[in-house]
Image (spheres, rainbow, N blue to C red):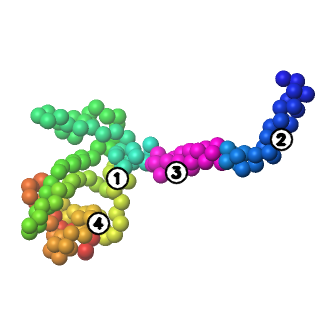
Amino acid sequence: MSFSSARAVLRISWRNIRRNRWRSVLVGLLIMLPVTGMVGGITYFETVTPGAETVATWVMGAADAEAYTMPGVQASTDQLRSTLPAGSTVEEMSTADGVVVLPGRRVSVTVRSADLEGLARGMLDLIEGRLPSSTSEVAISRSLASLPLVAMLGGLLLSRSLPPWSALRDVSAG
């Protein structure tokens, strides 16, 4: 396209815009609105979505790897240590589903056994109180602590025993 033909096209377009100003404004808005919405949506999504490193910390804490035992397979931490490089740290963690039994109510909970100051650092955040200092103590979530009878009793009893825990005491009160 030569310069003179480009100039003619621009002149015709400019005349069309001046002749129908409101239609031209509407067309411009209809083009800008979806583009603005997409840019805003992508920005919001990228802002609120945690990064891969954050998700990995929530799942694995400060650990570099996790090892699971399969049902029916007897494995010990000594066997695991023998397969890892020298100087590797191994900590046992366990997760189980439980039920908190309250008068007239059963609440499903997930019970985790982990050292929150060790390799599990970053998996959970302590909001108030202190970390458990023995196997007879437990840290509980705010939603569980907000149950009326849990706050009143100051202690919890799981419906099934999860060694070494049988009765768990909330340490956020003390």
Q: Earlier in the sequence, mark 4 or mark 1?
A: 1
Which residue is the site of mark 3?
A: 44
Quarter of the image with the N terminus in it: top right
Q: Nearer the viewer, mark 1 or mark 3?
A: 3
Res 123 label: 1
- Residue contact between numbered discs 4 and 2, judged by CB atoms under 8 Å: no
Secondary structure of residue under mark 1: loop
Secondary structure of residue under mark 2: helix
User: What type is the residue that disc 2 sits on?
Assistant: Arg
State yes or no: residue 25 in magenta: no
Of the pair 85 and 111, the residue shown nearer to us: 111
Q: Earlier in the sequence, mark 4 or mark 2?
A: 2
Q: Nearer the viewer, mark 4 or mark 1?
A: 4
**In the figure, is residue 94 to the left or right of 61?**
left
Of the pair 104 and 167, the residue shown nearer to us: 104
Q: Quadrant of residue 101?
A: bottom left
Q: Nearer the viewer, mark 2 or mark 3?
A: 2
Q: Earlier in the sequence, mark 2 or mark 3?
A: 2
Q: Earlier in the sequence, mark 4 or mark 3?
A: 3
Q: Earlier in the sequence, mark 1 or mark 3?
A: 3
Which residue is the site of mark 4?
A: 142
User: What type is the residue that disc 4 sits on?
Assistant: Arg
User: What type is the residue that disc 3 sits on?
Assistant: Tyr
Q: Quadrant of residue 19?
A: top right
Of the pair 171 and 41, the residue shown nearer to us: 41
Secondary structure of residue under mark 3: helix
- Residue contact between numbered discs 4 and 1, judged by CB atoms under 8 Å: no
* Gap between marks 2 and 3 measured at Cα: 40 Å
Res 15 label: 2
Q: Nearer the viewer, mark 4 or mark 2?
A: 2
* Segment tinted magenta in the rendering: 29-51
